Image: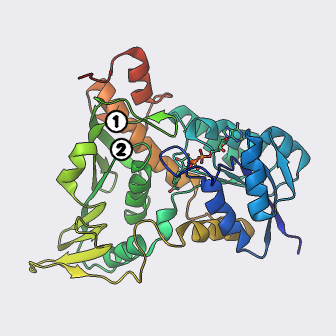
Amino acid sequence: MDKLKVGIIGTGSRKKKPGPTGFAMAYRHAEGYRRLPNCEIVACADIVRENAEEFAKAFDVPRIYLDYREMLEKEELDIVSICTWPHLHAQMVMDCAQAGVRAIHCEKPMADTWGNSKRMAEECERRGVQLTFNHQRRFGKPFRMARELLKAGEIGELVRLEGACGNLYDYGTHYVDMFGFYNDETPAEWVMGQVDYSVEKLVFGMPVETHGVFLWRYKNGVFGLMCTGDAAEAVGAHNRLIGTDGVIEVGAADGTPLRIKRKGSSSWEVIDTEGEGLHGPGYIERAIADVVESLLEGREPELSARKALNATEIIFAAYESARRRAKVNLPLDIEDNPLKSMIESGELTPRTG
Ligand SMILES: NC(=O)c1ccc[n+]([C@@H]2O[C@H](COP(=O)([O-])OP(=O)(O)OC[C@H]3O[C@@H](n4cnc5c(N)ncnc54)[C@H](O)[C@@H]3O)[C@@H](O)[C@H]2O)c1
């Protein structure tokens, strides 16, 4: 069988120090494809020639492009990984779909606005293109084992999911997505939230709140709660699954990857996650393997756009709630990114001093 032809958009550079603006996620994707005997990275594109050349050298990629559209035109790509910043995702996804790419694996967060998130998913759906987003924690043992414990009834019926991290849009997309994973991909019904924007902060070019508190109800009655910035301390664990008969924590405050407290017990039981933590190892490699396998099998991928949309709707609805100062019922009837719009209109301004 011919190998699947893979192209990469946005190679990044390993020469730069990793930070909030330069993780070079393309290298992580490429390591995933390199392990698969049925895949071959045939081309990469980056507007910075030096970045594309460095990447091509690292992964023996035969052709580089400075214009990804030219790459899409000239190469008959089966799979494209999009590893650029979020404001570029939607257009790139749509260009790939229109060029006949069969599977697109795009970095998180989905897009810069709710409208663009929906549009990119619709375009791929219409054209029968597989679209996935790199919420790779779905492949991590602490997260999967937490779900297994929940499904085995170890904490009774799920009541509430809690999460904590720096911000809702960028890091939080992983955890709102994980909540979908724990809660059988149930869509949310309504969302309420409030943001503090005292310090101007851009992550991968997108503004994020300084602190935030967000609450929502899923259609099955389970609640979701995310606390960000200083409010994260109120939750104190990366993920907490609260059931009628116990509690599970993923990424506990003491650094334990996974632990459970059962009804009637005052102590935590640490669960062995066999060396896997919140970030890996191996999660992105497994994500890429699933992207390829699901394409070949014609099944829904673990990281499907359908699941990512559920999480993304909650995130933009949470910002919309802050804008409306009201509970927001879903489906979300806006197109923009309310946080960005509020900043642009001057409704939200960083405090000085
Ligand atoms: N899944 C995760 O855990 C995780 C972790 C970190 C970052 N990310 C996400 O990965 C994405 C990329 O972040 P990064 O830090 O890897 O980026 P990066 O800055 O390291 O690399 C982005 C590259 O895109 C290139 N680029 C910009 N415009 C382009 C265009 N029009 N055509 C082609 N190339 C273009 C840049 O020159 C740069 O080389 C972001 O959306 C970020 O949120 C995900």
Q: Amino acid at mark 1?
A: Glu
- Splitting the image into 4 quarters, where does residue 285 fall? bottom right
Percent position (x, y) of residue 344?
Answer: 43, 19
At 68% from the left and 46% from the top, the residue drawn is 10
Q: Nearer the viewer, residue 270 or 158?
A: 270
The image quadrant where one finds the N terminus is: bottom right
Q: CA distance from mark 1 to mark 2?
A: 6 Å
Label 1 sits on a secondary structure element that is loop
Colour option used: rainbow
Q: Relative to residue 66, is residue 19 drawn left or right?
A: left
Does residue 86 appear anywhere in the picture? yes
Q: Relative to residue 296, is residue 321 drawn left or right?
A: left
Residues at discs 1 and 2 in contact (Cβ within 8 Å): yes
User: Mark 1 Cα within 10 Å, few/some/many (few <14, many 20+)?
Assistant: many
- Splitting the image into 4 quarters, where does residue 263 fall? bottom left
User: Mark 2 Cα within 10 Å, few/some/many (few <14, many 20+)?
Assistant: many
At 39% from the left and 34% from the top, the residue drawn is 201
Residue 209's mark?
1
- Splitting the image into 4 quarters, where does residue 353 fall? top left
Percent position (x, y) of residue 123?
Answer: 68, 41
At 41% from the left and 84% from the top, the residue drawn is 274
Residue 167's mark?
2
Q: Decide which of tag 1 and tag 2 comes sooner along the chain.
A: 2
At 60% from the left and 55% from the top, the residue drawn is 25
Residue 230's mark?
none
Percent position (x, y) of residue 20?
Answer: 47, 45
Does residue 214 appear anywhere in the picture? no
Q: Relative to residue 166, is residue 292 drawn left or right?
A: right
Q: Nearer the viewer, residue 135 or 180?
A: 135
